[in-house]
Amino acid sequence: MATVTSGSPPSSAPAWAALADIAARVADVSLRDRFALDPSRSERFAGAVGDLWVDWSRHPIDDEALGLLVDLADQRDVPGFCSRMLAGDMVNATEGRPAGHTALRAPDADDGVTGTLGRMADLADRIRGGSFTGATGEPVRAVVSLGIGGSHLGPAMAHEALTHLAHPDVTVRFSSSLDAADLTAALAGLEPATTLVVVCSKSFTTTETMVAADTATAWLSEGVGDDVSRHLAAATAAPQRASARGIDPDLVFAIPESVGGRFSLSSAMGLALMVAIGPEAFHELLAGMHAVDRHLGEEPVDGNVPMLLGLIDVWQRSFLGATSLAVVPYSHALRRLPDHLQQLMMESLGKRVTADGSPTAGPTGPVVFGAGGTDSQHAFFQLLHQGTDVVPVDLIGVARPVTDPRGAHHDGLMANLLAQAESLAFGRTDTEAAALGVAPDLVAHQEFPGNRPSTVVLLPELSPSTLGQLVALYEHRTVVQAAVWGINPFDQWGVELGKQLTTRFHDRLTGGADTGREEPSSGLIRRYRGLRGRD
Ligand code: F6P
């Protein structure tokens, strides 16, 4: 059975020791000196994947280090692992299944996948065309997608990113939080008679989503009566659970068990997105993802952009000690991308044991955070420029804007992106600050250390295809890191304990009387129950 590289730790690979030997020396050469010595650096340490241009020249890296990282990938069988993933082998060892997300967007997808996509397209077309009617015979004009984590973040992000393509007469909204305020806002102004609620849950057991589904069902019943079957759909890997909750099998759309939540954008989890942008655009998104899947499977490591980015992530984390990664899209439409990537990368790489259960030899996934540029420049960039930690940053730009009526905004966005990349990399010395007239006692405050790494990703435009390429690029970059470290990027056992304890605490918070048993949370439980008028 093929698994994530397991057994030997990554540090046993010959290239690992060589990288450890040169790390301090390579990091010691400033980015100023690197660019001064090699003006072609921004062309040489960069490459295309599909329509995207990716520039990793502002990392402390040279040909020797990059060559060793490529060797490391080979010694850790990263290409083999990626090929096995793409071939549908059992790469998710701890859950005993393949990782089927790339099969969802392959042109030769199996009948089950194409059948589901066809049924989704049929429903989407009928809603968009006004021929899908609800219980009262009125056409459905709104779709509300309920789901959380991977059953929410990707589709909600993509809907926001492609909102310029959304059908003008069909409202599409998303709700994820257990806080009723979220669902209340999502349903506000909608009519049950013209609304379809899509319950998105792979397991169909997730409390947040099931509670929201019950509340939404009650809201629908109040509007159209007990038979809400025309108003409830499901995207799930557990169709029998959806049916048990009274959802019409004709409106249940299957997700293969092998597709992990955070990798499920190209699955039926995207039903509401497909309604918004239309089946054709949804297929363009899938085609964009597939283009990057092919790149991953076909390009040699030294020309394979997702592999190189994953290897540079390993270089930053394992050899240079970076503990975080900031993702900053200079595109308002992409402002939810950091949320999606946070789940993708932190659920996949937040592991402390390898695929075979032994402790990892060193650190694994970094903390991932981010927000839209330029807002984030006025929020957390101070720390990136002058803080005591070095935080690698991904700066994502789009060349052609969706909208810029006066032509006054968009070039400014890209100028900001470049200015941040430049100032992070090259900083400002004390001499330069003094030469600018900075008062001597303020020079230390106005000096910028530089050597703060960034990766620039440039999209020609924001389209379904380029968005699909961007998402697939990050998916594969994540898997590559996992393959080097020997961890399983496809499981997420770490979220389970909190779920189990929630059930126990829910009973304590809502039960007839507090048990009186002392435990660490007793003080908070008593106070909460008091505030809720329960004791
Ligand atoms: O956050 C934990 C998690 O298990 C994610 O991996 C998943 O995307 C999310 O919960 C939702 O799960 P489900 O789709 O089964 O409701």
Image (cartoon, rainbow, N blue to C red):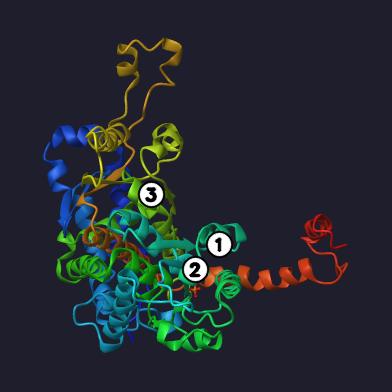
Amino acid at the residue labelled 1: Leu
Q: Is residue 226 visible?
A: yes
Q: Residues within 10 Å of mark 2 (few under 14, many from 20)?
A: many
* Residue carrying label 2: 146
Tag 1 near tag 2, CB within 8 Å: yes
Q: Residues within 10 Å of mark 3 (few under 14, many from 20)?
A: many
Q: Give the mark nearer the N terminus: 2 vs 3.
A: 2
Secondary structure under tag 2 reads strand
Is 483 on the left-hand or right-hand side of 233? left
Secondary structure under tag 1 reads helix
Tag 2 near tag 3, CB within 8 Å: no
Q: Residue shown at 41%/36% (left/top)?
A: 381
How many angstroms separate mark 1 from mark 2 (CA)? 8 Å
Q: Give the mark nearer the N terminus: 1 vs 2.
A: 2
Secondary structure under tag 3 reads loop
- Foreground pick, 517 / 412: 412
From the top left corner, tell me how far across and down residue 67 is, in percent: 19, 56
On residue 183, which mark appears?
Answer: 1
Q: Quadrant of residue 254?
A: bottom left
Tag 3 near tag 1, CB within 8 Å: no
How many angstroms separate mark 2 from mark 3 (CA)? 20 Å
* Residue carrying label 3: 335
How many angstroms separate mark 3 from mark 1 (CA)? 21 Å
